Image (spheres, grey):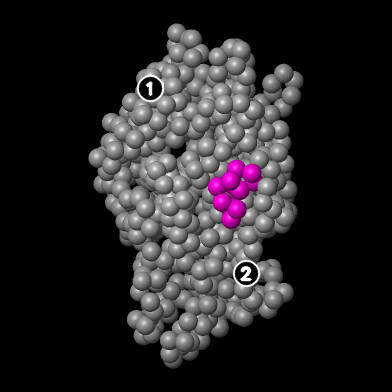
Amino acid sequence: MNNIYTTLEVKERRLLPADFKLTDWNALQPFFEELVNREITNKEQLNKWLADVSELEAVISEDACWRQIRMTCDTTNTEYEAAFTYFCMEIEPKMKPYGFELNKKLLECPFIKDLDNNRYFPYLRSVDNAAKLYREANVPLQADMSLLAQQYGVISGAMSVEVDGKEYTLQQAAKFLQSPDRSLRETVFSKVASRRLNDKNTLNELFDKLLAIRQQIAANAGFDNYRDYKFRELGRFDYTVEDCFAFHQAVREHIVPLQALLIRHRQQRLGVDKMRPWDTDAEPMGTEPLRPFSDGKDLTEKTLEVFNRLSPFFSGCLRTMQSMNRLDLESRKGKAPGGYNCPLAETGVPFIFMNAAGTMGDVITMMHEGGHAVHSFLSHQLPLTAFKEYPMEIAELASMSMELFSMEHWDVFFANDTELRRAQLEEMERVISVLPWIATIDKYQHWLYTNPGHTVAQREAAWLEILGEFSTGVTDWSGHEEYRTNFWQKQLHLFEVPFYYIEYGIAQLGAVAMWRQYREHKGQALENYKSALSLGYTKTLKELYTTAGIKFDFSPAYIKELADFVTPVLKEMGVK
């Protein structure tokens, strides 16, 4: 294996002392004051001011990220939770008025017209949007919302079940759902369902509090509902609410039938009369679940090999992260659920967090988060921190494309072609099945936030109706109706990052288009991929997708085109 490291230049600080560490607001405030009050009399001074603002943003961002990383790695550590809470309650709210003043100062600067519009347009558009949305009354509400949202991770991180006398996190227990022993699968599924339902009321109460705060934030900013406010806050300049509805319709028409085909294919392999919720990830008796790696170290080394085959640059990124202890991969009790790649704005070397338990899903997560990490490295050379704060529609394209690019090299994880083909089919099942789920969650969020003041019963009824729209009807949920009614509670995005979910759907379609390009012209596709990601957010989403060699389009016609590409690929994999 090529052991090169990918090196990044850490810019020398010019505004803050080299040894400055964020301790409290009093230490930070003078730098904001100086930037707000600094005189700007020419373009050069504007550029210097922008660079200093960027430096301050990078230092604060990296500090805040480390507070969250430490807390999610160990939700039982009260010091970590206190440090994160302190930032949310004592530092971030005090920064926001200054952020508004800095945005206003930039927008009112006469030399702004001299900036390169080709590079600065998305940034200035975002600054203008943020300035228009800012309300002082929302600052404490947003702080409260951050703290409440974090409780979801604490509640979920404490969930565990016992299997054969041993305790497992819910993430670890997922591996049992791949077992050929149907009785074991049903037992574990029922235990997980029961454990989640134990906190059903607690999570409903938490969600009601979040809904109330979010609606108030929207009202303070002059919006009828939080949906419309959040679309603006997320900077969705390149698509509309109506486009989201078109996406929902297209997924229902062109993707749900593919999902039904895949579920029936698995049903035939299992030889069961009815598919049950605990069958969807299982293999037939006599077929052992895929065990692609033994532990976090093994997962890391095998991922390095896969990435190196694609590009030595990709593996170099992970080698650098490994050398800096920026990988925490294995699941354990007290660790928050989920997985993420956290960019670290000043040093440029990100952190990957996940809950690996030895499953094929963990391999996909590692490829996914590795794609995010590569994006962080590729965009780090951009001069302003704001240029690297790219929208999720391009961020998720980076990660989902990496999953599909990497598939042909998964023989690193498997001893024979049969296992490799199984793994690749699992990925295709995930790609197809995630789109109806994304449409479900997104449409549900539209309902949640355009029906403020709804009751828990109304929420449950709306969820079941929307879930039914995107269900294949193949799987029989009888006996677990209550769990299905509350199934939305497992989606952390609803609690922690509202409306951040359709981005996955848009990017998943883009990733399929990238994979189609990769199958035709591997070298060109990888170069287009790197070129697009290196632009950060210095171009619009449509321009970034064009640079990547694909279309920013999720119309019914385009989704049908991509579904038509996938159908023969599934046949190649043995799906009939």
Chief secondary structure of the magenta portion: helix
Residue 261 disc label: 1
Give percent across and percent down for residue 46.
46, 83
Left or right of residue 303, residue 104 in this image? left
- Residue at (51% x, 31% y) in the render: 424
Between marks 1 and 2, how big is the CA–CA gap? Answer: 49 Å
Q: Residue at x 58, y 46 (%)?
A: 309
Q: Please report the bounds of the magenta region as a residue range.
A: 304-314
Query: Image height check: is 314 above or below 16?
Result: above
Instruction: Give yes or no for contact between labels 1 and 2 (Cβ–Cβ under 8 Å).
Output: no
Q: Is residue 308 magenta?
A: yes
Task: Report whether residue 288 is seen.
Answer: yes
Position of residue 172 relative to residue 404, above or below, is above
Q: Residues within 10 Å of mark 1 (few under 14, many from 20)?
A: some
- Per the image, the residue denoted by label 2 is 9
| Residue 287, percent from left and from top | 60, 16
Amino acid carrying mark 2 in the image: Glu
Q: Is residue 542 left or right of residue 27?
A: left
Residue 389: percent from the left, percent from the top?
Answer: 48, 62
Image vertical order of residue 200 relative to residue 265, above or below = below
Q: Tell me if I can see residue 326 in this picture.
A: no
